[in-house]
Amino acid sequence: MCDTMAWKIDKQKCLRCGACVSVCPELALDLREDGLKNDMKKCTLCGICERVCPSRAIEVKK
Amino acid sequence: MIKDKYDVVIVGAGPGGSSVAKTMAEMGYSALLLEKRQEIGSPKRCGEGLTMNTIRILGELPKNCIAQEIEGATLYAPNGNRVLVDLGADGGYVIERKMFDKWLAVRASRAGATVVAHSEVTEVLKEGNQIVGVKATIGGEEEREIRAKIVVAADGVESTISRKAGLNTTNKLVNVDSGYQYEMSNLKLETDRRIILYFGNDIAPRGYLWIFPKGKDVGNVGIGTAMADKSAKYYLDKFIASHPEIFGQSSIIEANSGGIPVGGFLENMVLDGFMVVGDAAHQVNPIHGGGMKEATMAGEMAARVMDKAIKENDLSAKKLSEYNRIWWNERGDKLKKVEKLRHVFEKLSDNDLNMVSESLTSDMAIGLTRGSKMLSMAKILMKKPALAKLARHLI
């Protein structure tokens, strides 16, 4: 899993369900067998992934 | 064991993928079904409720797939008012997805399909606009190319394969429920033969909370919420803490989360040499969030269309779009009505939900999940003048 100062994933909370991937408007997120990937080149920090995450494992700072 | 070329490669061994693989194999086509996870059926992203309707499509389940037979449902309005729904012949089972998904894959393999777990599709192969296969790490080994006349994405809610193929299946936030669920033991339930559903904007904003018994004192305790201020997990934990009469001595034996597509059906589900089925195509009943029946049916529809396309040697999107037409005709139009009901339901206050519970009958509740009885529901809402406008959406 990758993260930056602005987009953070809590690996303990993430259950790799893919809810975030299904709503990412920039197609930046990918759920691979080895974890959730966010392509920061595509990510606009819109925060939709944070809203849908059932365990709020994602934190987006704008 | 794995060839370089198949008639169809299916990505994802859930109910949708196995349905495609089995149906294609039965018609004599070579089918490769790939599952990225080490174990088919695990971790589950599901409440595990299956109605008789679905069982009639699938055929009787082996005993090890069935956790509990279900006769009815108990619905709780926010004020605690109870509505008893007698499912009668429409009852069903709470199943074990871990066994069930494997059984579906086993059936596909017995029909002649090749199934491989721990095999992740990393890329979709294209020649111009035509999808011609995939790159995959079969059994975790080095990436290799596998050619196919048609690639089917049955890869669940995240549906990354569709996007890699060039079909944007991104759903709107309002159309995806946040789901969280514990499998719990040592629950104190009145009966293990009824599922229990709790409604209320403080309990499960724009959704509901469920207890699906899995035999004696074990059950799935889960929640679906939408656009809520706090996480689905927060609301579930809060409910459990506030109901010691059920959960006082209980334990958590499994935790799962999931995104549940509850709307946003796709007008187009095909590309040249490519189709999408199941959760990946948002084929889920928007009122209860169940997707196993939809995925199974859509898988069979997709296979029927592929059969024709391959026989006529026309793998174009235009040819495969017959699947769009069939799906919308047989399922989409009905589910669209259910989606409308959901949008109305989401706008109801706790007082409105209490009022509905006073008049809701067993037959109505069952009908509503199938896109019928909308008029009866509208009549209930119209008792309150302020809801008349909302009620008109159902007519």
Image (spheres, coloured by chain):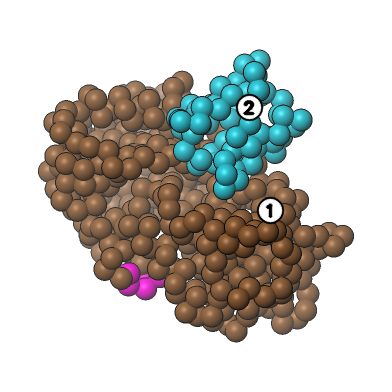
Chain colours: A cyan, B brown
Mark 1 and mark 2: span between their CA atoms? 21 Å
Relative horizontal placement of residue B231, taking residue B2 as reference (left or right): left
Residue type at tag 2: Asp
Q: Of B177 and B328, which appears nearest the observer?
A: B177
Residue drawn at the location 24% of the way across and 52% of the way down: B214
Task: Say whether residue B57 is magenta.
Answer: yes
Task: Say whether residue B149 is magenta.
Answer: no
Relative horizontal placement of residue B267, taking residue B351 as reference (left or right): right
Residue drawn at the location 60% of the way across and 84% of the way down: B28
Residue wearing tag 1: B122
Relative horizontal placement of residue B4, taking residue B207 as reference (left or right): right
Residue type at tag 1: Thr
Q: Chain of mark 1?
A: B
Let me know if marks 1 and 2 both belong to one chain.
no
* Residue range (magenta): B56-61
Tell me which corner region of the image, top left, top right, bottom left or bottom right, holds residue B74.
top left
Label 2 residue SS: loop
Q: Of B289 and B254, which appears nearest the observer?
A: B254
